[in-house]
Amino acid sequence: MGAAMETKSRASSTAPDPTQSKPLLGRVAVVTGGSRGIGASIARELAASGATVVVNYVRGAEAAAGVVAQIEAAGGRASTEAGDVSKADDVEAMFGRVKENHGRLDVLVNNAGILRDKTFKKMSITDWHEVIETNLTSVMYCCHSAVPMLLENGWGRIINISSFVGQLGNFGQTNYSAAKAGILGFTKSLAIELARFNITVNAVCPGFVETEMWKSVPPNVQEKILERIPMHRVAKPEEIARGVRFFAVEGDYMTGQSLNINGGIYMGW
């Protein structure tokens, strides 16, 4: 009898603590542009840490559903939400549904973005506005809807996906560079305002990442890019996702910061 009780007690004491393996258990996270590439990896990473993840998409309904299926197959919880984050009405409606369906929001990852790469002399006004609205103004729209929900919790994590291009600049990307640099300024200012409410605001700045876009680059161009990267390889989407998880889970005393995951292509302070 005593031995049985001792065995039971020992088993109980060694039982895994779900708050350790799933530190985001009970939290709800929204990942914009979460149907593919970096966004999909972020969604899977946060779900693996216990969060219920809302995968936002615009046109990739099937891809977004596939990400949700992967998360659920791994034992996580996720759902999809359609919405064009470059449109204020779409964003407001989407976050309204998040509140209605989940009752809360804890983590916002502003990941959605597009490219319209051209040299400045060939860039149209439309090329400029589409990138600024999707990559930068969307961050303001999403935060505008999300912050009141985070304030209700007295806790929150906002992680904005910027880029080394916003720090260094890049040929043919004046619109993209301006948007990503704008995200960094926005991140720092919002971090100052929200710090007293236990809401952190940080940015992740990836370098080149192994996505569908990278695979479409001709091999000779890829090699020239790799020559610029000290580690001579591009990042895996999962490596960017782990940086996001760090801010969401471990970065309690970090706000207004930029985490550079770029293989050394930019080493500015």
Image (cartoon, rainbow, N blue to C red):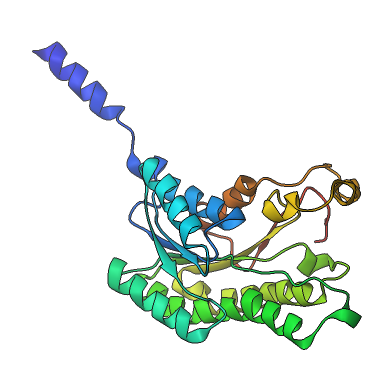
In percent of the image, x 45 and y 75: which residue is there?
146
Q: Is residue 223 above or below residue 80?
A: above
Q: Is residue 148 left or right of residue 157?
A: left
Percent coordinates x, y for residue 154 in the rendering: 38, 70
In percent of the image, x 47 and y 62: which residue is there?
61
Q: Is residue 154 left or right of residue 60?
A: left
In percent of the image, x 52 and y 52: which residue is there?
250
Q: Is residue 19 left or right of residue 158?
A: left
Tell me the quarter of the image containing the N terminus.
top left
User: 188 and 112: which one is in front?
Assistant: 112
User: 227 and 264: which one is in front?
Assistant: 227
Percent coordinates x, y for residue 107 in the rendering: 46, 64
Percent coordinates x, y for residue 55 in the rendering: 46, 61
Q: Is residue 211 above or below residue 142?
A: above
Q: Quadrant of residue 28?
A: bottom left
Q: Is residue 34 above or below residue 114?
A: above
Percent coordinates x, y for residue 246 in the rendering: 56, 51
Q: Residue furthest left?
A: 1
Can residue 20 be seen from the camera position used here? yes
Q: Across the whole image, how many numbered discs are drawn on residues? A: 0
Tell me the quarter of the image containing the C terminus.
bottom right
Can residue 49 be seen from the camera position used here? no
User: 21 and 1: which one is in front?
Assistant: 21
